[in-house]
């Protein structure tokens, strides 16, 4: 089951054909019903959409199930975008961060997706407010438009080099955390700073400070693990070097006001795609 929260008028009257097309069934096989109405259901329907009215920035909650429908190889994001485009409205759907319950995503009619901070207040009907949005959305005029740093560190990034050095969950992996983090930084750079193409400069500084610690933590390892850890460090350093440009530390110094004299070589290079250049709010999108 997937629950979507939407803006818009008369959504329950309009959504059946969208769901039918998305799930590959006929409109007759889609049952759109009031969540509290148990008498007038089509219990044989392939797709069910239970709706409930909301208050605040959002108008409808849609609990969608498709147990008997052909399962498309599509995601909640695909469904949210299909509804947003078809009905020309904005759709809130769950984020991929279940541990941060207040973070959701918004899909727009233009096909954009951004993270949002939603707030639910008890009431009849329930009141929903979008407090923060990564992208400016006309339907949420009071939302603060800014990036949401909480989502960055929650993103699980692959670390194949350090995984090969010390197996996931291995005895020494916790000790080698600064090296694991160093590899994650290079992976972030190579991927153009997921999930939102942005990375705060203070987090970047923390990553470089952890890199400063790597030689010290390697000396704490058994001799056989030290060799593999040094090999891993060399590979990750090479990746960092490829992804950065030597500017004498000018860009980082200007962004942080930190003195960089006497710091290691990696402090004097900048990413080829500096993530802190992307902090201004996005222009407003029209529906």
Image (cartoon, rainbow, N blue to C red):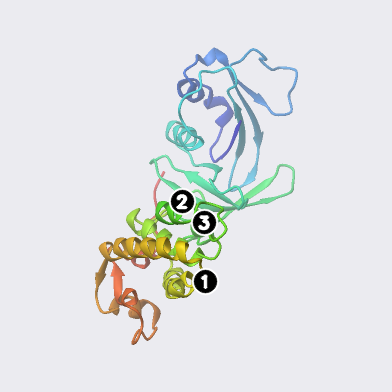
In percent of width and height, residue 164 lies at 43, 52
Of mark 3 and mark 1, the one earlier in the sequence is: 3
In the picture, which quadrant includes the C terminus? Answer: top left
Decide: is 68 above or below 172. Answer: above
Vertical comparison of 47 with 120: above or below: above
Asked which secondary structure carries label 3, the reply is: helix
How far separated are the C-alphas under marks 2 and 3?
20 Å
**Distance Cα–Cα, label 1 vs label 2:** 51 Å
Identified at 38% across, 56% down, the residue is 187
> Which residue is disc 3 drawn over?
151
Tell me if mark 2 has few (under 14), some (14-19) or many (20+) residues whose alpha carbon lies within 10 angstroms of its own: many
SS category of the residue bearing label 2:
loop
The mark lying in front, picked from 3 and 1, is 1
118 sits left or right of 152 in the view: right
Q: Quadrant of the N terminus?
A: top right
Residue holding disc 2: 137
CB contact under 8 Å: marks 2 and 3: no
Q: Secondary structure at mark 1?
A: loop
Read off the residue under disc 1. Answer: 220
């Amino acid at each position: 089951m997937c629950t979507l929260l939407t803006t818009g008028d008369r959504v329950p009257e309009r959504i059946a054909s969208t769901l039918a097309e998305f799930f590959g069934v006929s409109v007759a096989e889609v049952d759109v019903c009031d969540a509290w109405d148990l008498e007038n259901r089509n219990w044989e329907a392939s797709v069910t959409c239970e709706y409930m009215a909301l208050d605040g920035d959002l108008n409808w909650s849609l609990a969608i199930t498709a147990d008997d429908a052909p399962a498309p190889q599509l995601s909640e994001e695909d469904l949210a975008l299909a509804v947003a485009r078809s009905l020309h409205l904005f759709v809130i759907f769950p984020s991929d961060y279940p541990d941060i319950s207040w973070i959701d995503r918004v899909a727009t009619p233009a096909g954009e997706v951004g993270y949002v901070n939603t707030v639910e207040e008890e009431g009849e009907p329930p009141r929903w407010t979008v407090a923060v949005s990564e992208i400016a959305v006309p339907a949420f005029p009071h939302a603060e438009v800014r990036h949401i740093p909480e989502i960055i560190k929650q993103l699980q990034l692959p670390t194949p080099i350090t995984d090969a050095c010390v197996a996931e969950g291995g005895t020494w992996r916790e000790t080698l955390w600064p090296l694991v983090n160093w590899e994650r930084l290079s992976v972030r750079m190579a991927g153009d700073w997921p999930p939102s193409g942005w990375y705060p400069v203070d987090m970047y500084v923390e990553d470089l400070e952890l890199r400063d610690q790597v030689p010290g933590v390697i000396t704490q390892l058994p001799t056989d693990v030290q060799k593999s850890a040094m090999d891993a460090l060399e590979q990750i350093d090479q990746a960092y070097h490829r992804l950065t440009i030597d500017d004498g530390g000018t860009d980082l110094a200007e962004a942080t006001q930190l003195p960089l004299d006497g710091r290691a070589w990696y402090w004097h290079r900048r990413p080829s795609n500096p993530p802190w250049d992307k902090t201004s709010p996005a222009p407003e999108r029209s529906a």
